Amino acid sequence: MSGSTTTVIKGGTVIDQTGSRRADVVVSAEGTVLAVGEDLDGDRTLDATDCVISPGFVDLHVHLRQPGKEEAETIETGARGAALGGFTAVVAMPNTTPAMDCAAVVREVIDLAADTICDVRPSAAITVGRDGESLTPMAELVKLGVRIFTDDGTGVQDDRLMRTALEYAGSLAHLSGGRPIVLAQHCEVNALSEGTYMHEGEWSSRLGIPGQPAEAEELMVMRDIALARLTGTRVHFQHMSTAGSVAMIRAAKAAGLPVTAEAATHHFCLTDACCADYDPLYKVHPPLRTDADVAAVKEGLADGTIDAIATDHAPHTPQDKERTFAEAPPGMLGLETAFAIANTHLDIPIEALLGALSWRPAAIAGLDPEHGGPVVEGSAANLAIVDTETTWTVSGADMASRSNNTPYEGMAVRGRVRHTILKGEPVVIDGEAQR
Amino acid sequence: MSGMQHLLSMADLDRDDIEQLLNLTDSFAEVSARQIPKVPALRGKTIAWLFYEDSTRTRLSFETAAKRLSADSMNFSVGSSSINKGESLRDTVETISAMGVDGIVVRHRGAGAPQRITQWTDACVVNAGDGWHQHPTQALLDLYTAAHHLGDLDGRRIAIVGDIKHSRVARSNAIGFATMGADVTFVAPRTLLPPSLEGWPVTVTHDLDEVIGEVDICYLLRMQLERQEQSVVPTLREFHEEYGLTAARAARMRDDALIMHPGPMNRGVEIAGEVADRPNAVITEQVTNGIAVRMAVLYLLLGSGLDLVDERAHVA
């Protein structure tokens, strides 16, 4: 594609944080929206009839497995899956091997993501080796572009260390051009969850699988709300899965505390009953919860308590999942199904749905307006063009991921990503990745 | 029942299934009592023992049952196999299956492992204990033993006492006895009960003294001594005082009431030493019956598929 090529996206409805309007959108190969209006033309045309043109989606929570577990996923394949899911930016979690806890590994991830078809932004660990004992060189990592710190996969157990991390991170804005530094927490009190493999309740009792109570998550949510109050530093709550967590975050926001939250797609459409056949496909952390929790997460997304829909995309090879429930690693795929699952299962206006997938997570990650910004002349051309009506059947084998551990295999879902534009380049056209 | 391929959980058996198995057990108990306790019923069939968790009595019982049925067996124990070399469960199962086995008897510390295994083999799978989940042949031998003494179990009352939370025996027996019409009561402190008993056919009490004088069966569970390190009970002494079958409590039991235990016992913990030797303690009888029950299970799953009448004739 030559530098002067323009692409027009024709026949769709633009929906962003400023509202909804029928318009064609012209983007340049240099990565800019050139025009938004009626009856526009370009060198190349992408049909968007009956489609919504949205700012590109932003996923705050993906596991791309590189470095260390390239058999399950690489940054390249993960980014391809993300683009197919309408994401133009994803935040890679630091639980790689070695962990993203120092400049060398973060630089490696940045290098590996240099030419991917989705913008991959590294997060970094809060503690060295994610072992909860000493802080990573946060200032150095912020200077490399890290905006989100998390020990995801585990929570920071030590109260004093978490307070210290928040205070220190709250002193780094001068290194990030004023952009917020966010500490994101995987809320799980190990003392209540050690040696458990699913949600504790009716199903765990019946199946004889050791379970962790909802309170294992909620106690840490409670603590970190208190620490956000104490330190004034923003805390982002990852993959909120229980009714109690949603209620506490709602109250914390009402009290004006600096907290945000995400929910993973599987936590608003699957329950612990899925574990009835001991299939580790449904093993995930935090675990699938009850119907009441699912309803509360949906309610949290409907009223804005939960800011963002994340995938917690967690690829695992078939051989890793072909174990017993206790032995198999937790996690499930999510990137290529997120929009369809949200569109199928959430009864919220399309503007709110796109907000939770795009501009709200973009703001949390400090990626706006490059990602998630309004679709206007002069803005960055990172777009998702989606069809909200088409139904299709999920198939793990058809995914770009190196793994196929989707919990939605064979499920009929409604809504599909048609095109994705990254920096002006149509990286996905009619559901096909272009490279 | 004749269409059943595996025995994974007592929840898979209805009352007719259990009665059929217990009737068949009668025939095999008769075989076991013979001078030469062996029949050719499973000649030419091969059974693999896949024990990922230590077991002495269950394994010996299954092996004896298989020998009395003239089946060949194949050992695959953790200590001496590729399991220790990191082979996955699926690969192990497929390897065994490739050698041409008809049945796999599995014990695994992970709940649900036998069910997973059924997806990777055409052989019949028998659950010999999976984590905290199920131990169906234990429940069947307990039902057989109880019925031998008490007759019809309909309306009989059984107290299952002690560490229920971590017990596959409790889960299997609760379902099994309830399916046969018995009233099942769990007796334990909250720390030793499953977090939820929603949908379970049981009542619960924390007070053993409340029920001990009324029950037809007092079923004691093995207290796993390592649990005490997690402080699920303050001390074993206190557990014995509150939930152990002491001599004083045993004396309050009805004359015809049975004392049962799946073994191995911790004398002085869940059961007082002298109580285990009382005439109404049928603990060694449970062990004896275990062989006939397992013969019945292996025969029903691996046998010729003849109906029960023919099977009796064949056995005789």
Image (tube, grey):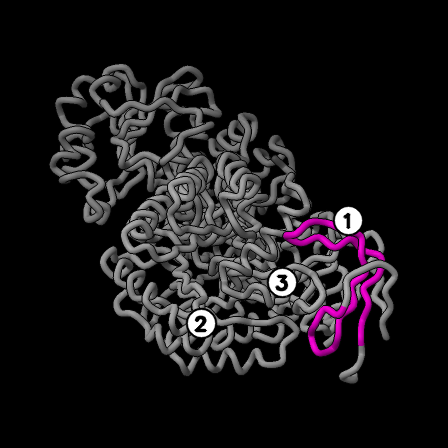
Q: CA distance from mark 1 to mark 2?
A: 43 Å
Q: Disc 3 marks which amino acid? A: Asn
Comparing labels 2 and 3, the label whose residue is closer to the camera: 2
Query: Quick one: quadrant of the N terminus of chain B?
Result: top right
Q: CA distance from mark 2 to mark 3?
A: 40 Å
Pointers 2 and 3 within a single chain: yes
Pointers 3 and 1 within a single chain: yes
Identify the mark nearer the N-term, 3 or 1: 1
Report the front residue among B45 and A307. Answer: A307
Q: Disc 2 marks which amino acid? A: Gly
Residue A330 visible: yes
The chain that hosts pointer 2 is A
Q: Residue at x 44, y 17 (%)?
A: B154
Q: Look at the image and say whether residue A24 sits in the magenta stretch.
A: yes
Magenta part of the protein: which range? A6-34
Q: CA distance from mark 3 to mark 1?
A: 20 Å
The chain that hosts pointer 3 is A
Q: Residue at x 67, y 54 (%)?
A: A16
x, y percent for residue A14: 74, 55
Mark 1 closeness class: few <14, some 14–19, many ≥20 residues within 10 Å: some
Comparing labels 1 and 2, the label whose residue is closer to the camera: 2
Q: Eyeballing the image, is A301 above or below A165? A: above
Q: Disc 1 marks which amino acid? A: Thr
Identify the mark nearer the N-term, 2 or 3: 2
In the drawing, what numbered circle is on residue A404?
3
x, y percent for residue A44: 85, 73
> Can you tell which quarter of the image residue B301 is in?
top right
Report the front residue among A370 and B126. Answer: A370
Residue corresponding to mark 2: A177
Mark 3 closeness class: few <14, some 14–19, many ≥20 residues within 10 Å: many
